[in-house]
């Protein structure tokens, strides 16, 4: 895929500003409700940027069991839904 600038990459991007860890988790939880199987999110940022905080909020929005650890150090991990044993 090429963007209008001729560069390969996503056709769109969005930026949001939040001012607290709790706000970031609420935002991510809301976003989780809008995702579907196969959707891809790429998180970038330095140490302490909020990637884990975001991912934990996203897990809430997706309805998975708590216990999500840093996405920086986990390549693949299954988080079963709360409804399953």
Image (cartoon, helix red, strand yellow):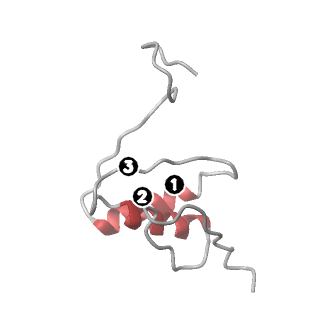
Mark 2 secondary-structure assignment: helix
Q: Is residue 4 above or below residue 75?
A: above
Point 42% across, 58% down: residue? 27
Mark 1 secondary-structure assignment: helix
Mark 1 → mark 2, Cα distance in angstroms: 6 Å
Is 58 in front, or is 26? Answer: 58
Which comes sooner in the sequence, label 1 or label 3?
1
Closer to the observer: label 1 or label 3?
Answer: 3
Rendered location of residue 56, percent (x, y): 46, 69
Is 78 placed left or right of 21 in the picture?
right
Mark 1 → mark 3, Cα distance in angstroms: 17 Å
Contact (CB < 8 A) between labels 1 and 2? yes
To which residue does mark 1 refer?
Answer: 31
Is 5 in front, or is 24? Answer: 5
Point 29% across, 48% down: residue? 17
The dot on residue 27 is 2
Quadrant where the N terminus sits is top right
Contact (CB < 8 A) between labels 1 and 3? no
Mark 3 → mark 2, Cα distance in angstroms: 17 Å
Q: How dense is the environment of label 3, judged by Cα within 10 Å: few (below 14), some, or many (20 and up)? A: few
Which comes sooner in the sequence, label 3 or label 2?
2
Q: Quadrant of residue 53?
A: bottom left
Point 29% across, 58% down: residue? 49
To which residue does mark 3 refer?
Answer: 44
Q: Is residue 82 above or below residue 14?
A: below
Q: How dense is the environment of label 1, judged by Cα within 10 Å: few (below 14), some, or many (20 and up)? A: some
Quadrant where the C terminus sits is bottom right
């Amino acid at each position: 895929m090429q963007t209008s600038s001729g560069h390969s990459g996503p056709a769109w991007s969005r930026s949001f500003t939040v001012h607290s860890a709790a706000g970031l988790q609420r935002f991510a939880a809301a976003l989780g409700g809008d995702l579907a199987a196969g959707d891809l999110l790429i998180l970038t940022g330095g140490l302490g940027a909020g990637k884990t905080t975001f991912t934990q909020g996203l897990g809430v929005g997706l309805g998975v069991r708590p216990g999500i650890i840093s996405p920086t150090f986990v390549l693949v991990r299954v988080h079963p839904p709360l409804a399953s044993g």
